[in-house]
Image (cartoon, coloured by chain):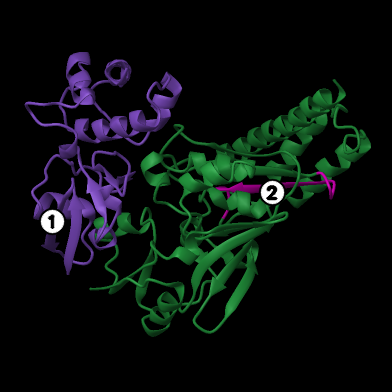
Amino acid sequence: MLIRLNVNGEWREADVWPGSSLLAMLRDDLGLWGTKNACEQGECGSCSVWLDGELVCSCLVLAAQADGRSVGTVESLGREDALHPVQEAFLEAGAVQCGFCTPGFEVAVADLLRREPHPNDETIREALSGNLCRCTGYQKIMDAVHLAADRMGEAAR
Amino acid sequence: MQFFRPSSLREALEIRAAHPEAVPIAGGTDLMVEVNFGRRRPEAFLDISRLPELREIRREGPNVRLGSGVPYARVIRELPDQVALAQASRTVGSPQIRTRGTVGGNLGTGSPAGDALPVLAAYDARVVLRSSTATRTLAWRDFLVGPKRTALAPDELIVATEWERAVGPGSFSKVGTRNAMVIAIAGLCLQLDEAARGVRVALGSVGPTILRAPEAETFAAGILDEVGAWSDRGARVPEEAIARFGELVSAAARPIDDVRGTGAYRRHACAVLATRALTWALDDRRAAAMEAAS
């Protein structure tokens, strides 16, 4: 079936199988490989995207359910030559090791900082509880969130 | 494979009647796991995630009606005074799951581990079902008939759950290996009803379906009566009575051994959760009594 999505501000369409997830459509049909496919059961958060501005696991949404709606992926955050402050902070704090979970974390962190510009540790842990990282042990990710929050706070001033 | 996308509840119910093979999908947080893993290949999907009728929260006096399509994130934001339900909602999955998952989905899946379900049981909630020709309202225990078995007919949709708000402290707590993304090994909701002088306790993940603990409820209400705590919220309830309450709640469980925990551990967890929940409720009442007195 033909599905049309507004992805990162641009209308895109693809002919997908009705049982196809939004994640599969983004990766396999639209070539947006930043959103990662790991667990396919909502456990790991690697496929986090915004659906109409809300943070969701794209593996648990049917592409057909997203028809006509707006989707934001990690590609909307920054580009290689113009990283988002969250992405800069992840690099600087050493919050990236193998990197597989990183796009999902960056989307979840950007989502958190939109709602809560200066989160404390507890708030960060709860907000990121749906994202798994098997390399860093999370402390560097916590550092990155604080660093990004400080930078974005300064930039806003 | 077909995909139906009705724009109103009426249209959805007509499709449901004509195509009982179409599997309703809202947040998809249970169903999509099955689909992604190839364990289920529905002939058709019926997308109910955008039906405005299912996304309403209505309150009239003490009565609350929660649309089946309201996601947990909204329950947390919009029903903070339904303390136990908001607490249970906050323990569901993760933020990503809570923006999509719904109480209607918990009911539809009918797992004894559904976090919202012990709360609905302790609230004496009713489940509202509709078909294209009729509306049925069932008590929660008549709807949840077994492990992952419900009374939903093939031509019906779950449209809402409703209850009368009990005035009094209440809480939800569960035991699991971490604070997020966990299927409860045991879950418990305790709700005091000051007006009826009643204590209600419901258990999840420790039986084929959600269980109430009637003997423990009668015992606790009686003890509060004995020590005069219903009229004087500051009155002390002896520790031994709280411990006995825990034992009685534990005795109401009908747990099995499975990958998440043993039956013995689950029974123990029920006693711990029950004594904690009653202690919190009594502490809340004493704090309120002290505040009122100062």
Instruction: Compare residues B17 and A55 and report the one nearer the observer.
Output: A55
Is B203 a magenta residue?
A: yes
Classify residue A16 by image quadrant: bottom left
Question: What color does chain B have in the rendering?
Answer: green
User: What amino acid type is highlighted by mark number 2?
Assistant: Ala
Query: Disc 2: which chain?
Result: B
Label 1, secondary structure: give it: strand
For the question of whether residue B244 can be seen, the reply is yes
Residue B217 in the image: x percent, y percent?
Answer: 78, 46
Write the start and end of the magenta stretch as one range: B194-207
Residue pointed to by mark 2: B252
Q: Which mark lies nearer to you, 1 or 2?
A: 1
User: What amino acid type is highlighted by mark number 1?
Assistant: Arg
Image quarter of the C terminus of chain B: top right
Image quarter of the N terminus of chain B: bottom left
Instruction: Compare residues A41 and A91 and report the one nearer the observer.
Output: A91
Considering only vertical position in the picture, is B18 above or below A109?
Answer: below
Query: Disc 1: which chain?
Result: A
Farthest front residue in view: A157
Instruction: Compare residues A44 and B85 and report the one nearer the observer.
Output: B85
Residue pointed to by mark 1: A12
For residue A82, side relative to residue B130 (left or right):
left
Mark 2 Cα shell of 10 Å, populated few (<14), some (14-19), many (≥20): many
